[in-house]
Image: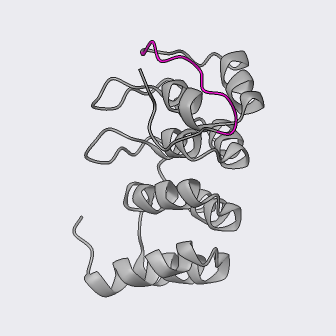
Amino acid sequence: MTLPDDLISTLSEAVEADDADAIRHTILTSKLNGHDLGEWLTMASHLGNMDAMKALLEHDADVHWKNQDGETAFSFACAYNQFDAARLLHEHGADINSVDSSGGTPLDWAVCHARPEFRAWLMDIGGTRNSDHEEWPWPPKTDGCGT
């Protein structure tokens, strides 16, 4: 469904502000469905905005929604070191081994961008890797994952 620009803006601002009440109000007045909410769940997970994530999940936000690059809310949580967000998504059935358009998995992103204990948790719950990047020391020295 194509959403009106003002609705996109309102929901985006509420997610960025981690304003669960505004998110709930917007969802209820706009009659958005779970698939429509996947994009904002991804945004909230990237930011680590837990109240926003919980409000979106209360309204059945699609934890399996993928953007045009095949990235999910779970993969964004891993790429941006948002451990609590990743655990919440896992509790709601997120695919911990989804593959994006570049062939990467959430654990592939985590080896470059997440704390060692986050990486260990991903491996403990069955996370797999498709890349052969070496794990980076924490904290990472640069923004990109090296070869």
Q: Residue at horizontal 73%, vertical 28%? A: 116
* Quarter in which the C terminus is drawn: top left
Is 30 situated above or below 119?
below
* Quarter in which the N terminus is drawn: bottom left
Q: Residue at horizontal 64%, vertical 66%? A: 55
- The extreme right residue here reads 117
Is 70 situated above or below 82?
above
Q: Residue at horizontal 49%, vertical 25%? A: 108
Q: Is residue 71 left or right of residue 101?
A: right
Is 87 situated above or below 62?
above
Q: Residue at horizontal 54%, vertical 72%? A: 15
x%, y% of residue 142? Answer: 52, 42
Please state the extent of the stretch shown in magenta in the rendering.
131-139
Determine which quarter of the picture holds residue 101.
Answer: top left
Is 144 situated above or below 123?
below
x%, y% of residue 77? Answer: 57, 45
**Residue 102 vs residue 58, the one in the foreground:** 102
Q: Is residue 47 magenta?
A: no
x%, y% of residue 35? Answer: 39, 54
- The extreme front residue here reads 141
**Colour convention:** one colour
Q: How many marks?
A: 0
**Residue 108 vs residue 142, the one in the foreground:** 142
- The extreme left residue here reads 2
Q: Is residue 73 left or right of residue 141?
A: left
The majority secondary structure of the magenta stretch comes to: loop
x%, y% of residue 111? Answer: 58, 26
